Amino acid sequence: MPPKSPRRGAASRAPEEQPSGGGNEIGDQDFATLCEKLKVSSPVRSRAWQAYKKMIASDLILQDTLKKIEALGLCLFIASVDSDDMTFTFTEILRALDISVSNFFRLLNQIDINMDNLSTKVDNAVSKLQKRYETTCNLYQKFQRTFDNIFMEQTNNQTSAESNRLHLMKSSWVTFILAKGNVLQMDDDLVIAFQLLLCVLEYFIKRSPSDVLKEPYKSAVNGTSVSGSTRASRRGQNRNTGTSQKSEADTKVIEALCKANECPVGEVKHVYASSFVDFLDSAGISNIDGLPKVDVISQQYEQLYQKNKYIDERLFLENDNTLKVDFQESLEQERTPRKNNLEEPSVIPPQTPVRAALNTINQLMTILHSSIDEPSEILNSYFENCTVNPKNAITERVNQLGLMFRLRFARAVGQAFAEIGYQRYKLGVRLHYRVMESMLKSEQERLSVLNFSRLLNNDTFHRCLLACAVEVVVATYGRNFYQSLTNSETDISFPWILSVFEQKAFDFFKVIESFIKGEPSLTKDMIKHLERCEHMIMECLAWQSNSPLYDLIRQTRDREGADHPEIVSTLQQPSQHNPTAADLYLSPSRNLHNCAASSVNITSNTNGHGPHPSQPQQRSTSLSVFYKKVYRLAYLRLNSLCTSLLPDHLELEHIIWTLFQHTLQHEYELMKDRHLDQIMMCSMYGICKAKNIDLRFKTIVTAYKQLTNTNQETFKHVLIREGQHDSIIVFYNLVFMQKLKSNILQYASPRPPTLSPIPQIPRSPYRFPNSPMKIPGGINISVSPLRSPYKSSDGLLSPTKLTPRARILVSIGESFGASEKFQKINQMVSSAERPIKRHADGAAPKPLKKLRFDGHDEADGSKSLSSESKFQQKLEEMKSARTRIQRQKSEESSDSTKTEDSIKKED
């Protein structure tokens, strides 16, 4: 059952022009002209022309959407990247093809979809180009807005060239892109790059005449002792005292800039002292009077531009055609809807990418405002209650990991930013202690114990908890939300933190859910990022060959027999107990059915002995939880793929899932150093072959690319055997089919095997703090948590001042106002078409006609468990109100009790 080779277009269409036949010339005249223009080497020419001939010979490329010159240029770009022989910059090839950045990326993606012949090296290079380009676009947009807020459009005296607004804009932008290229190793770091931009703007503000400045910068400049730290009055001063150690007056401009842009002033000052001052020296502009000459700065940038082979960022100032169109497309600015009330203008700023990043940082600062980077009194009390006090080990571990983080951060971002990295680490430490305290409080309430010695003396638990906290901080600053797994040496996105703290992904997995529940103030983006980290672990990271997962599986199989420990039938039942981090890190020596007695129960075993010999062998909680989540994730992705590819054969989904689940359960060695989606695609292809459904791997791969969080390396770079990788087709033929051929053939027989149950897909435990919940029953009412407040001149905005997207906004806990709003809600509920669900006895519940809110109803849920979030409390209060109304109505009939119980179950 090997897949058929991709069908090549026969000689139905020959190449447009054959290579000219003289000497060593390659290609036709158009190709030769383009190569000469881009100064392409002979090996790259040969490789590119061969690729072009394959493109023309294939029926998969549409000539009406791809011009010949564009196809030739794209082939040259691909060949240059693959050969590590780039003789032209990105801007030079864009101009040679007369094409914009967005169109270049779009056509390259079209070639990859139609021909699927781009290497992983090209994919990574294009991804890096896109990321850098988007970052530069966002920075230039922010530069324009900030520049307009600083400098006057017109002045009374325009005779001086330095006071010319266009001259100021060009000088400051070119200085910034030169500084960014020289200082930053990760030039796609949006936050640090913006902080560097503020340093550049401060440099130009101090050297500009006061009559070209707006307030408050004009007053800030007039209030400084000198307008620049390198003016003639400071020539005789030592540079370190003249620039690095600024006087209080000298900081007024940078403080005004930081306040206007809601940027941490301490971090910007550190960037200035540790990086920007050195840049001024290296650029030769630290001791000049007035503004630097544009020609001098531009010449230095030209050298950097030719070295990096990137786009010419100076062209943003000229609104160049290669950037003009996609500049607008790439910004993706989200604007908050404004109120209809014209008397009260909206105070919520537009959500540009830079603004969104700064807002997220400010939200993190708000969360950690009252936290400290050492154990609190409450934590110390928990430590003292332990059989072995863990405080010294915890603090020493934090210090050691801080030194390691500082070193690795500087290596990735740049030595000048080592201190910035350490400051971010200290924020993570504060968050780590905060969540630890919340976890212990929750465990105390759940188990009624105070001695957590086994958990608090667990090195792996502490390293993973700290890694999770630091990852939240790094992702918040680095804007790494939803980024794919990459191999870049300077990439500090997940799973970089695991290598820094020397932790395995499977161990890190155990802390994620408890971390999120332990800090209800996490923003929606933070929660989504941690959820994505968890998915990456389940997809591939936990299946690496050095993962402790395999030892745990083998130990459990040896103890419980040949069958896999995770019983598939249990997936249909909801968990009666959600395991905590303590359950998972102390597993398998923890029995879920006797959790309260054995959970970190050092009081009954103060000598640190293991379980009593008479205790039965216990199942691994961490393995059970891991497999349940893997099955749910796997089925959700399979369901999405089947919906796209097999709309006329939906019955095959269950069969494919059975083979998929069988592989994960019994042939788990196939997952070693591979990806969950690789097994999914092979399972789909194998079942379709057995059922004689014409579904090609190319079709599967094309649909797979449309799923969320996919990477082309997943199907282009699959492990075949040790040290050898190839495409997903080769993996299927040489590995997957050879291992599972007999299983696949069973589904083509008259007596197919029993189908595996579909996993129960509960609502994500990570969505409740930030996502709206729709009221069951089809009514157009949703309950949303309070959004993170924004600051205004009057302080924090109350919930009733936030801009609603719905027709009616109800904020539980505040004065509701006029009673007409209650009537409107009741009318909405009573007029809604509510689906009536029949029960086993044939009776249908009566529709709920009114939804009542009053002081008595709101107070009923006040005694809910403290471990629940406020949002859950309010939701339970609403459900309690509905239940009381239903109970009152149900007293009219003898069968009201059954009906009421059914409604409760539906809720």
Image: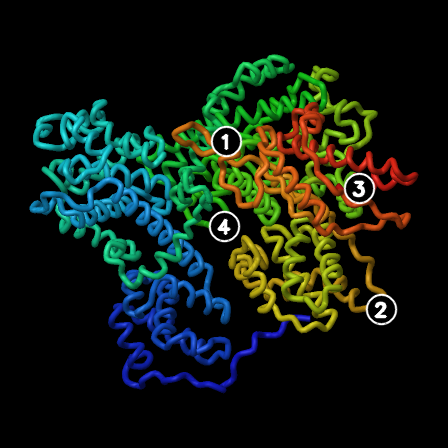
Question: Residue 858's mark?
Answer: none
Of residue 51 and residue 551, the one placed in the foreground of this image is: 51
Callout 1 touching callout 2 (CB < 8 Å): no
Q: Pointer 1: what residue? A: 798
| SS under mark 2 | loop
**First-in-chain label (4 vs 1):** 4
| SS under mark 3 | helix
Q: Pointer 3: what residue? A: 903
- The spot of residue 559 in percent (x, y) is 78, 38
Circle nearer the viewer, 1 or 2? 1
| SS under mark 4 | loop
What is the tally of numbered marks visible in this picture?
A: 4
Q: For marks 4 and 2, give the CA distance.
A: 43 Å
Q: Pointer 4: what residue? A: 484
Q: Which residue is found at the position 40% from the left and 44% from the top?
A: 350
Quarter in which the C terminus is drawn? top right
Q: Pointer 2: what residue? A: 750
Callout 4 touching callout 1 (CB < 8 Å): no
Residue 726 position (above or below residue 282): below
Which residue type does callout 2 highlight?
Pro
Q: In which quarter of the image is residue 46?
A: bottom left
**First-in-chain label (4 vs 3):** 4
Q: How crowded is mark 3: few (under 14 residues within 10 Å), some or many (20 or more)?
A: some
Q: For marks 1 and 3, give the CA distance.
A: 35 Å
